[in-house]
Image (tube, helix red, strand yellow):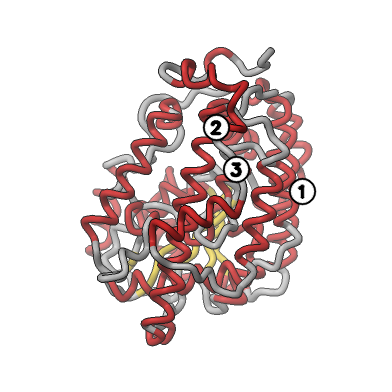
């Protein structure tokens, strides 16, 4: 019998779909070769490159087989695999036919990272009000290249594909919108270029493949970040700007690889009360996993995210110890909310970025729009996941003391 809380279980029509669960493995097989064949048939392409992509795909499939997906979950996995496999084929093909793309500079990108749910989305959306900041829209990050006849354009098709993908996500996980709601034109994080190279946050955060998350800690992440840069170069060809403004919490776990590819990156690390951040992330993750797995134990979600957050902090601090202070800016969410313009001016000064006074009005207007990517009230209780707020803060005491949160 499922341990999933009733409020998080799939709704209609997925309750009916999941009546097929006894036949789920026969109806929706999940294996790398059949997924690749479908992607190749849809694109007419066959080259995935030689950067370890297929090994990462095999690791992902192996980890997916360790969890008990429902019929709905297996369909979702097949859809997501096809999405990223077809993207990968088109990216490799476009790069082969247009080698000049690799010469497009990506210089001094602003990279926002931090633990999940620490205000990265809010800061990213506010910084997008600066016209000098190139911020990716969801539709272009979901589909960084178009079809073969127009790989760096094909905007209408890419928008339609993104709309379909988001529509399916919204129907599968309707309660996700209270924590993280995405529309095609929304400013979005740059985890999708990594997922196109089969280094996927979705596979563990939304499906609960904890072993996969831990396995990735030992990967060489430089190849996925090289692909990440290549996709930014392709997006820059579509629309150029002075500098990229990127955000992805998962960069915190991979700062060494990110800096190997973007050595001049300007890193902004956000900080928030860890009990609120981890409680919020557990809530978001549980809402997604509950629609994919046949049974969910909430304490497993809590145990993973508390441990994984500690690992992310430790890995980031080890990399930060080797960087000049001029390359890192620490931003507490409470400070940003209380004194936004003072904080933003200080951030720009820290990285020696030009700050025209007209930016103040732009930033205040954007803040007034409350760009939190949430619809409704995100209610959660950290104790639902097996620990109290004080226990979370105690487990991460050194981090809290170091950054005054």
Q: Secondary structure at mark 1?
A: helix
Image position, residue 260 (x, y; %): 62, 76
Mark 2 falls on what kind of element? Answer: helix
Compared to residue 33, the image places residue 338 above or below, namely above
Q: State the mark number for residue 30.
A: 3
Q: How far apart in space, not on screen, are marks 1 and 3 (Cα)?
A: 42 Å
Circles 3, 2 touching at the beta carbon (< 8 Å) = no
Residue 402: x percent and y percent? Answer: 71, 53
Q: Nearer the viewer, mark 1 or mark 2?
A: 2
The residue carrying mark 2 is 27
In-front residue for pair 202/157: 157
Dot 3 crowding, Cα within 10 Å, few <14, some 14–19, many 20+: some
Which label sits in the foreground, 3 or 2? 2
Decide if residue 345 is on the left or right side of residue 225: left
Label 1 sits on residue: 398
Residue at 38 percent of width and 81 percent of height: 97
Total marks shown come to: 3
Say which quarter of the image contains residue 11. top left
Q: Earlier in the sequence, mark 1 or mark 2?
A: 2
Q: Is residue 247 visible?
A: no
């Amino acid at each position: 019998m499922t341990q999933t809380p009733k409020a998080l279980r799939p709704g209609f029509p997925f309750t009916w779909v999941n009546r097929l669960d006894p036949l789920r493995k026969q109806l929706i097989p999940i294996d790398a070769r059949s997924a690749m064949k479908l992607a190749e048939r849809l694109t007419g392409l066959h080259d995935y490159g030689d950067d370890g992509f297929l090994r990462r795909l095999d690791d992902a499939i192996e980890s997916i087989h360790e969890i008990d997906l429902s019929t709905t979950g297996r369909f979702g996995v097949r859809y997501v695999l096809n999405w990223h496999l077809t993207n990968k084929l088109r990216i490799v093909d476009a790069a082969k036919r247009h080698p000049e793309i690799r010469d497009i500079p990506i210089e001094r990108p602003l990279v926002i990272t931090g633990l999940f749910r620490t205000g990265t989305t809010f800061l990213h959306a506010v910084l997008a009000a600066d016209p000098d900041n190139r911020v990716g829209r969801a539709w272009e990050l979901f589909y960084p290249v178009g079809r073969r006849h127009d790989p760096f354009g094909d905007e209408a098709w890419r928008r339609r594909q993104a709309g379909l993908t988001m529509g399916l996500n919204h129907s599968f996980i309707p309660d996700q919108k209270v924590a993280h709601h995405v529309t095609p034109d929304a400013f979005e994080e740059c985890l999708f270029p990594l997922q196109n190279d089969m280094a996927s946050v979705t596979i563990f955060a939304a499906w609960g493949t904890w072993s996969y998350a831990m396995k990735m800690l030992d990967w060489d992440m430089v190849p996925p970040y090289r692909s990440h840069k290549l996709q930014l170069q392709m997006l820059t060809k579509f629309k150029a700007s002075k500098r990229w403004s990127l955000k992805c919490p998962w960069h915190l776990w991979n700062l060494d690889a990110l800096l190997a590819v973007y050595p001049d990156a300007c890193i902004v690390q956000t900080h928030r009360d860890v009990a609120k951040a981890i409680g919020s992330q557990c809530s978001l993750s549980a809402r997604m996993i509950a629609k994919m797995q046949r049974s969910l134990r909430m304490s497993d979600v809590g145990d993973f995210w508390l441990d994984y957050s500690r690992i992310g902090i430790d890995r980031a601090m080890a990399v930060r110890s080797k960087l000049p202070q001029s390359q890192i800016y620490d931003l507490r969410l409470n400070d940003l909310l209380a004194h936004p313009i003072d904080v933003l001016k200080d951030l720009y000064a820290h990285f020696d970025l030009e700050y025209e006074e007209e930016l103040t009005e732009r930033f205040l207007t954007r803040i007034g729009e409350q760009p939190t990517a949430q619809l409704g009230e995100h209610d959660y209780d950290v104790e639902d996941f097996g620990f109290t707020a004080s226990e979370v803060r105690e487990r991460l005491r050194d981090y809290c003391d170091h950054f005054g949160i």
